Image (cartoon, rainbow, N blue to C red):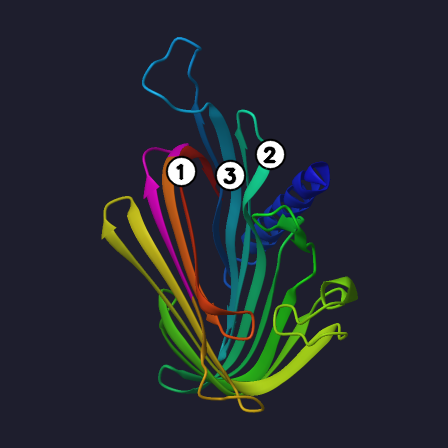
Amino acid sequence: MKKTILSFFFILVIISVTAQETANDTVKLWTKNGNISLLFNQTAFNNDWLGGGTSNLAGNLGLNYDFNYKKGNVVWDNKIIAAYGLTKIKGSETSKTDDRLELNSLWGKKAKGDWYYSLFFNFKTQMDVGYDKDGNNISHFFSPAYFQFGPGMWWKKSDNLSVNFSPATAKLIVVHPHYTEFGPSFGVLQGDSSRFEFGASISGYYKFNVMANVSVENRLNLYSNYLDNPQNVDIDYQMNVFLKINKYLSANVALQAIYDDNSVKAVQVREVFGLGVNYGF
């Protein structure tokens, strides 16, 4: 599975480079921006070390790529996010520390000023098997998979600041039936393999520079399901801090907070920090 994931990352890079070449051929239509990062950390102790500690090895591979189109009154913004991380603690099995694959696509046609009529699509899943603290298999590729689609209005002040309002959003959650055999999973009822929702979505994007070579990217998605407890709003907030040390070295901090009461009635938090090799394109 690990080789499959690395191959998948390689395919994403090929797609990104191809998109880059297309952008170079049609400079006036396409703009691109992205980076691939490899974050690595390692700690080791010999048998005579008295301060305590356990040797460990960890690495994270990430891709964040934007390819946007603009022609006349039409704009089309796209973003691919992929991340995968592993850690190995001496005496324990290798475990997953990060795993995500996300595609965002937002099409708009100018209405007036900074406002556009819009259509958006969002897809999220993971690439590898996930285990709980007891070692039970609780997820794998495309299980769960989340899809959202809907028309709306898009306020786009710039490429770094925008908000999309979609009052008629369709949402589909897909899981393999073996995860719902004995009970509900990720909001999908026992015995089912999917869950359909219809509601309202608000998504915001804001990116700014704190100082030279330090940028902060914020993404927020709110969703209310008209068909079931619309007062319980799903929240997905993501923050990425990127520090460019030089052309090839960087530091990254990724923070994600999720609240979805259909999955778990608590706030899920993920944080990743690393220093490593970065390639921008």
Q: Earlier in the sequence, mark 2 or mark 3?
A: 3
Real-space Cα separation, disc 1 to disc 2, in angstroms = 18 Å
Residue matched to label 1: 274
Task: Indicate the position of residue 35 as horizontal and vertical percent values.
Answer: 48, 45
Q: Based on the picture, tell me whether residue 243 belongs to the magenta stretch.
A: yes
Q: Earlier in the sequence, mark 3 or mark 1?
A: 3
Task: Point out the residue furthest to the left here.
Answer: 211
Residue type indicated by callout 3:
Asn
Image height of 123 relative to 241, above or below: below
Residue matched to label 2: 94
Q: Residue at x 72, y 74 (%)?
A: 190
Looking at the rendered structure, the secondary structure element under dot 1 is: strand
Q: Residue at x 36, y 64 (%)?
A: 160
Q: Nearer the viewer, residue 195 or 179?
A: 179
Q: Nearer the viewer, residue 258 or 201?
A: 258
Residue 111's tag is none
Q: Earlier in the sequence, mark 1 or mark 2?
A: 2
Residue type indicated by callout 1:
Gly
| Residue 106 located left or right of residue 144 | left
Name the dominant secondary structure of the magenta segment.
strand
Task: Indicate the position of residue 124 as horizontal and vertical percent values.
Answer: 60, 63
Q: Residue at x 38, y 73 (%)?
A: 162
Real-space Cα separation, disc 2 to disc 3, in angstroms = 13 Å
- Which residues are the magenta region? 237-249
Residue 60's tag is 3
| Residue 51 located left or right of residue 44 | left
